[in-house]
Amino acid sequence: MTKGGETATGAVGRPRSERSRRAIIRAAGELLEEQGLRAMTVEGVAQRAGVSKKTIYRWWPRKGVLALDAFYDDWSSAQEELMPDTGTLMGDLRLRARATVRLMTSERLGPTFAALLAEAQSDEALADALREHVLEPLREQARAIFRRAIARDELRPDTDVEVAIDLFQGPLFLRLLYTHAALDEAFADAIAEMALTGVLPRESTT
Amino acid sequence: MTKGGETATGAVGRPRSERSRRAIIRAAGELLEEQGLRAMTVEGVAQRAGVSKKTIYRWWPRKGVLALDAFYDDWSSAQEELMPDTGTLMGDLRLRARATVRLMTSERLGPTFAALLAEAQSDEALADALREHVLEPLREQARAIFRRAIARDELRPDTDVEVAIDLFQGPLFLRLLYTHAALDEAFADAIAEMALTGVLPRESTT
Amino acid sequence: MTKGGETATGAVGRPRSERSRRAIIRAAGELLEEQGLRAMTVEGVAQRAGVSKKTIYRWWPRKGVLALDAFYDDWSSAQEELMPDTGTLMGDLRLRARATVRLMTSERLGPTFAALLAEAQSDEALADALREHVLEPLREQARAIFRRAIARDELRPDTDVEVAIDLFQGPLFLRLLYTHAALDEAFADAIAEMALTGVLPRESTT
Amino acid sequence: MTKGGETATGAVGRPRSERSRRAIIRAAGELLEEQGLRAMTVEGVAQRAGVSKKTIYRWWPRKGVLALDAFYDDWSSAQEELMPDTGTLMGDLRLRARATVRLMTSERLGPTFAALLAEAQSDEALADALREHVLEPLREQARAIFRRAIARDELRPDTDVEVAIDLFQGPLFLRLLYTHAALDEAFADAIAEMALTGVLPRESTT
DNA sequence: TTCTAAGCGAGACGGTACGTCACGTCTTAAG
DNA sequence: CTTAAGACGTGACGTACCGTCTCGCTTAGAA
């Protein structure tokens, strides 16, 4: 999908082996799940996939990017529930927050997601790929939700959507990375509501 | 301060060399600043500090924890401005947000902080130390701000302070780690305000 | 020649680098001569040969075996003079004893030989290699000399050749290892003669 | 006995602890027997003896010399049988050869003796101590045997006793160090006889 | 229908850092 | 002045992955 998925353009010579590609992605995914990104070595992936290291390096520049590819398979198939359309901002945020929490706490995706987010700090190529294929799409989904709310007149047109997205997503990422407190449905609901109305009491409700 | 700072309890035998301890912390800090956590190797620290690797391993279990110690020296001396007391919640949050941004974007602390936050994902010992000595203190400072606001009747007594802290800090950490958008004073102000009032328009301003 | 010399059998993958092999043997030989076996470290050999430690460990299990390989280069080219054929046992033994003394006292081979003989006491692999490639060939040469003497009727057919070899070689090795007395041509001649006739006076000479 | 046994001359202050000395010798001997000289580390001896490393280094310059001390305790108590006096050279040599073989093949002394002989190649201090306290006494015993034989007129007065000693002892040492063939009573007898009469047939017996 | 350029497995290679080990020296406080 | 305890600088150990580099062998489209 990211780098490892593009077939050579001017196809001359032996074509890329789809079999190897799949074996690599699969082996990487398994190792990732079993032992985490730290223990997922290129050497290990090559061995488990029955593939030479050279083949891996031919198609993936760094192991982080390979890990992202392996992660992306599962990730992409779980995106729909992140884009609810309930007709109200509150409804959309609540469902999205809950879905996000579910993804982040799923056994397969959660730890790997966290590991990739961390690894990106020291791997520029991974950071770029992660931003492009995972983080930016997430923001774009959130953007759509807020834009619909503006169109519906729920939000003022001059709302700073980018800040709003960070306000909404930041807390969720924070609890994923530093498990200082529960990342559960109650937290999802609390964040959805507090992002909407802030911490201050509404005047009408005082 | 964290692990590497504790002197032997029942002092028998040759006492720990304060000189070495300082040389190690200092060398680690320098390497950290010059080249980042990835390039800060135990071997390099030992060489620059004029110290044997064994001595480092005797006192710091992993390089992450050593890095934290080096980081903490600078970090701890910059905590005061994170605890403003302006008399209003809005004032406190704005000043704290701005101070946080300054810290996160400072040349010395910012990149190292981000690197440590990332490293902690794959180093349990570091994660614990980081939580105990850095993250929890940060939360405690924020807690104090919100508690004062409750005492002042600015906030309802049943406000979920933990969620409020995440709402306030999450966005700042997010932009530190994934530089998707500017981490500047304007953002600090926007977060301070939006955390207070939420994204929805206030009725009074409608 | 011993272990480090065998090329992979079922040649698959990149073939072994002859260039590296030679550089390693050469560097080891130089260090051996300059500083002795104790100071010949794998690390030092790797550095001088411009080779990674892994490459050395891939082909030589212990440094003793590598040292033997380096030693063997010189050693094997000096074997001819150890196999004189003068037509008489006395002539053969005298020439062989002198040649042995020359080898043992040569600046290149002597100290290394002694060091290898010693090292073999605590390195089973080296002991085996040493026996197979150095000590047993030496005995075989001596065996040939005694057998020719038996064929010539100089010795009784029931002479215990193995004991005879030890009687002849033991003293030479002893003075090599424990330099309690001179290892020189006079000693060589004395041993050759005394091994032949024993310490008791011949009846004819009484 | 060698270095570790001498008490400080100008005895002032706390006297040397006899208790420690004995514990060290004993621990060293045990480790020597259990695992060989290679595995007998100063650190291990200190720990087992409940003694500080400093104390060991204060009295023994190198671990080889300590090992020799530990070895010497047993060794010295087995010297008498090495000095037979049967009235004939043949009788003396045969008994001495047999006794030597027994010593060399004893479980306690044999391997340690071989290890010390080897270690001395790379430890000058040990080599000196070994020569002085073990090897030279052995030669002196042998010298006495040959001198008595000369006095008895069994040997010619101009016999080169030093060469004779090497001829007699060399083969025994050789089989101890390089176990190329059995080191047993038959070999002892064969060496005793062949050293006396040489490999050539006696004219009278032809 | 052979040519030929690329992909491929195997695995050796030069590196860098790892974490451990033993050495022999040192610095305390206790005796 | 010796001792037990134990920290220290030194330096080598053997291992693990990294990312690169031959090899000899497909493989399939172009000649």
Image: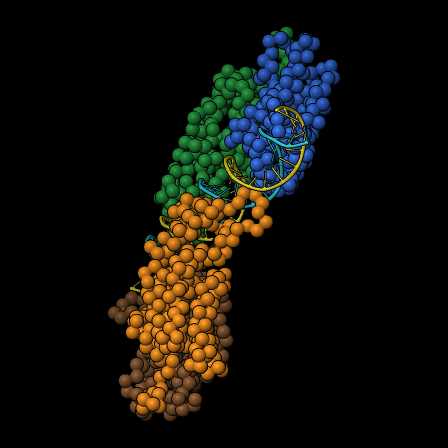
Chain colours: A blue, B green, C orange, D brown, E cyan, F yellow
Percent coordinates x, y for residue C36 in the rendering: 36, 58
Percent coordinates x, y for residue A84 in the rendering: 72, 20
For the C terminus of chain B, the quadrant is top right
Q: Is residue D195 above or below residue A94?
A: below
Which residue is at the front of the view, A100 or C155?
C155
For the N terminus of chain B, the quadrant is top left
Give me the residue at 51% from left, 20% from top. Answer: B183
Question: Which residue appears farthest toward the right when viewing the image?
Answer: A86
Which residue is at the front of the view, B40 or B196?
B40
Q: Is residue A48 above or below residue C161?
A: above
- Residue D123 visible in the shown view: no
Q: Is residue D115 left or right of residue A182?
A: left
Percent coordinates x, y for residue A182 in the rendering: 64, 33
The picture quadrant where one finds residue A138 is: top right
The picture quadrant where one finds residue C50 is: top left
Badge count: 0
Which residue is at the front of the view, C15 or D12?
C15
Percent coordinates x, y for residue C61 in the rendering: 50, 55
Which residue is at the front of the view, C27 or C38?
C27
Give me the residue at 39% from left, 75% from top. Answer: C87
Q: Is residue A155 above or below residue D179?
A: above
Q: Is residue D34 above or below residue C156?
A: above
Give me the residue at 39% from left, 77% from top. Answer: C89
